[in-house]
C-alpha cells in the first residue's frame, strides 16, 4: 500500500512510475488527494469542536458554583450543540476515510528503476542462463506420459477424488515429492533461514497484509463459513508473523523458510500449456521470506536470487533468470526475477520460482516497522522467493532425465529419495 504522504507530495511521480506497470493511476490519485484534503480538514474541524466543547464544559462547573444557573444552562445547550456537531463531523470523517482507504488499496506497488518497460512476458529480460539443454531421442515422452508409464502420478484418480488440477502422487512419485521438499528445506536452513510450519488457512487480515486481498480474492479458495482463505503461497502466513510488530534495530536480518501445500483456483486455465503438472490447483512449494532494513533489501534480493540459482544448478536443470518487465509484474512487487527451467520433451520453458522485493509496500499494509539507530520508527522492507515450487521442477526432472528404460534421479537428490532411478 502506498503512503498518503507520497501520494500527497509526489502525485505525478506515482502516476509516472505506475505507467511502467501499464496502470493508469491519474484518476485514482486525484480522487485520493481530494479525499485526503477532506480528511485533514474534517479532523481539524473535529479537533476544534472538541476543544471548544471541553472549554465550555469546564465553564459550567464554575458558573454553577457562582450560582449563575441560567448562564450555566445556556452553556449546557451550547455544549449539547457542539456534541451533536462533533457526531456529524465524525460520521462524515468515517465515510470519507472509508472511501479513501478503499481507493488507496487499488494502487499497485511502484516498480523500482531497474524494472524494464514492457507489457507482456515477451518483454522480460533474460539476465542469465545456466546448465545445458539435454538432447532427447525421437521417442522422448512428456512428463504426463512418463507418469503413467512408471505409475508415479495419477491424474485421473485426482479428477475422481476432487477434480482436474489435483493429482495423486504414488510410490516413487510420492517419495520424490517428499525428497524435494526435504532437500529444499535443508538447503534453506543451512543458509540461515529459520524453518517454520505455518497454518495453510489464513484470515482476511493476513490476505490483506501481503496484498492478496482485495486484489486476488477470485484466485483464492475461500472457506466462507469461517471467512478463512486457503493459502496460495507460504509467503502469506509467514510474512504475517510480523504483522503489527515493531522490530529493534539489531533484529535484522529476519530469514524464514516454510513448506506448505498451495491452493490456487487459476480460473480459466485450460489447453496444452496447462497439461499434466504445468498448472495445478493444489501443489507443494517451499518458500523463503526475508525482512530487511530498506538500505539492505537489494543486497538481500541479490543474495536470494543467487541462493535459488544454486538450488536449480544442483538439480542439473537447464535454467534461465528473467527480470520481469513492468507489465508482467505482480500487483505488490517492486521488482521480480523469475526462474525458468527447460522442459526438453515439451520444448518450452517452465517457470519454477519468482524472487521479489516488495520494498515497504507490504510492510505498510502489515504495519511492520522497526526502530532505527536514532530511535525513529520506520517501515521495513519485505522480500520472498520460491525455493522451489515442485510441479514444474518434477516435470522437467522426469522429462530431461528419461533414459529409455528409466528416469535417472539427480545425484544431489539420491540421499533423500533412497533410489537412483525410477523404473
Image (cartoon, helix red, strand yellow):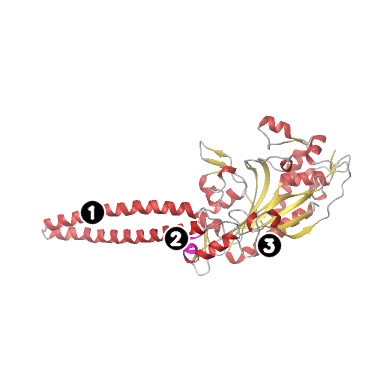
3 in the magenta segment: yes
Q: Quadrant of the C terminus?
A: top right
**Where 13 sits versus 139, above or below?**
below
Instruction: Say if residue 15 shows up in the picture.
Output: yes
350 in the magenta segment: no
Query: Quick one: which residue is furthest to the bottom in this view?
Result: 374
Determine the CA span between mark 3 and mark 1.
Answer: 61 Å
Disc 1 crowd, CA 10 A, few/some/many (<14, 14-19, 20+) = few
Look at discs 2 and 3 and give the one toward the viewer: 2
**Mark number, residue 287:** none
Nearer the N terminus, badge 1 or badge 2?
2
**Mark number, residue 81:** 1
Left-right relation of 251 to 164 = left
**Residue 40: image x %, image y %?**
38, 61
- Helix, strand or loop at mark 3: helix
Determine the CA span between mark 1 and mark 2.
Answer: 31 Å
Residue at point 83%, 52% (across, down): 133
Look at discs 1 and 2 and give the one toward the viewer: 2
**Where 82 sits versus 407, above or below?**
below
Determine the CA span between mark 2 and mark 3.
Answer: 36 Å
- Helix, strand or loop at mark 1: helix
- Helix, strand or loop at mark 2: helix
Q: In the image, which residues are magenta? A: 2-8
List the residue tagged with mark 3: 302
**Residue 265: image x %, image y %?**
62, 40
Left-right relation of 30 to 21 = left
**Where 400 sits versus 360, above or below?**
above
Left-right relation of 319 to 293 = right
List the residue tagged with mark 2: 33
Instruction: Say if residue 201 shows up in the picture.
Output: no
* The image quarter in which residue 278 lies: top right
Amino acid at each position: 500500500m502506498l503512503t498518503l504522504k507520497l501520494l500527497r507530495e509526489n502525485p505525478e511521480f506515482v502516476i509516472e512510475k505506475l505507467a511502467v506497470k501499464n496502470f493508469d493511476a491519474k484518476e485514482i490519485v486525484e480522487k485520493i488527494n481530494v479525499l485526503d484534503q477532506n480528511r485533514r480538514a474534517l479532523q481539524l474541524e473535529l479537533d476544534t469542536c472538541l476543544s471548544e466543547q471541553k472549554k465550555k464544559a469546564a465553564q459550567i462547573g464554575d458558573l454553577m458554583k457562582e450560582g449563575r444557573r441560567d448562564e450555566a444552562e445556556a452553556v449546557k445547550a451550547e455544549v449539547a450543540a457542539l456534541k451533536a456537531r462533533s457526531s456529524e463531523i465524525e460520521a462524515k470523517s468515517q465515510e470519507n476515510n472509508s472511501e479513501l482507504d478503499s481507493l488507496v488499496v487499488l494502487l499497485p506497488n511502484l516498480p523500482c528503476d531497474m524494472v524494464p518497460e514492457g507489457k507482456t512476458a515477451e518483454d522480460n529480460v533474460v539476465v542469465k542462463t545456466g546448465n545445458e539443454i539435454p538432447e532427447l531421442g525421437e521417442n522422448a515422452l512428456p512428463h504426463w506420459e512418463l507418469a503413467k508409464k512408471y505409475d508415479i502420478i495419477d491424474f485421473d484418480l485426482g479428477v475422481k477424488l476432487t477434480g482436474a488440477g489435483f493429482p495423486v502422487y504414488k510410490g516413487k512419485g510420492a517419495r520424490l515429492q517428499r525428497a524435494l521438499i526435504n532437500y529444499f528445506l535443508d538447503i534453506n536452513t543451512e543458509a540461515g533461514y529459520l524453518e517454520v510450519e505455518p497454518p495453510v488457512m489464513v484470515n482476511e487480515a493476513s490476505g490483506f497484509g501481503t496484498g492478496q486481498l482485495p486484489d486476488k480474492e477470485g484466485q483464492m479458495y475461500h472457506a466462507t463459513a469461517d471467512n478463512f482463505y486457503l493459502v496460495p503461497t507460504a509467503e502469506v502466513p509467514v510474512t504475517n508473523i510480523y504483522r503489527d510488530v515493531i522490530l529493534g534495530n539489531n533484529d535484522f536480518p529476519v530469514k524464514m523458510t516454510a513448506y506448505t501445500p498451495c491452493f490456487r483456483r487459476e480460473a480459466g486455465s485450460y489447453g496444452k500449456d496447462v497439461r499434466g503438472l504445468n498448472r495445478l490447483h493444489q501443489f507443494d512449494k517451499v518458500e523463503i521470506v526475508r525482512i530487511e532494513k530498506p538500505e539492505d533489501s537489494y543486497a538481500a534480493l541479490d543474495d536470494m536470487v543467487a541462493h535459488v540459482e544454486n538450488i536449480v544448478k544442483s538439480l542439473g536443470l537447464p535454467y534461465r533468470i528473467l527480470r520481469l518487465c513492468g507489465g508482467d509484474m505482480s500487483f505488490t512487487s517492486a521488482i521480480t526475477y523469475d526462474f525458468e527451467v527447460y522442459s526438453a520433451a515439451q520444448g518450452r520453458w517452465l517457470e519454477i520460482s519468482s524472487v521479489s522485493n516488495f520494498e515497504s509496500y507490504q510492510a505498510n499494509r502489515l504495519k511492520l516497522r522497526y526502530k532505527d539507530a536514532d530511535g525513529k520508527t520506520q517501515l521495513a522492507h519485505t522480500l520472498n522467493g520460491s525455493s522451489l515450487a515442485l510441479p514444474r521442477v518434477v516435470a522437467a526432472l522426469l522429462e530431461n532425465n528419461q533414459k529409455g528404460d528409466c528416469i535417472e534421479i539427480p545425484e544431489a537428490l539420491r540421499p533423500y529419495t533412497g533410489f537412483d532411478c525410477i523404473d
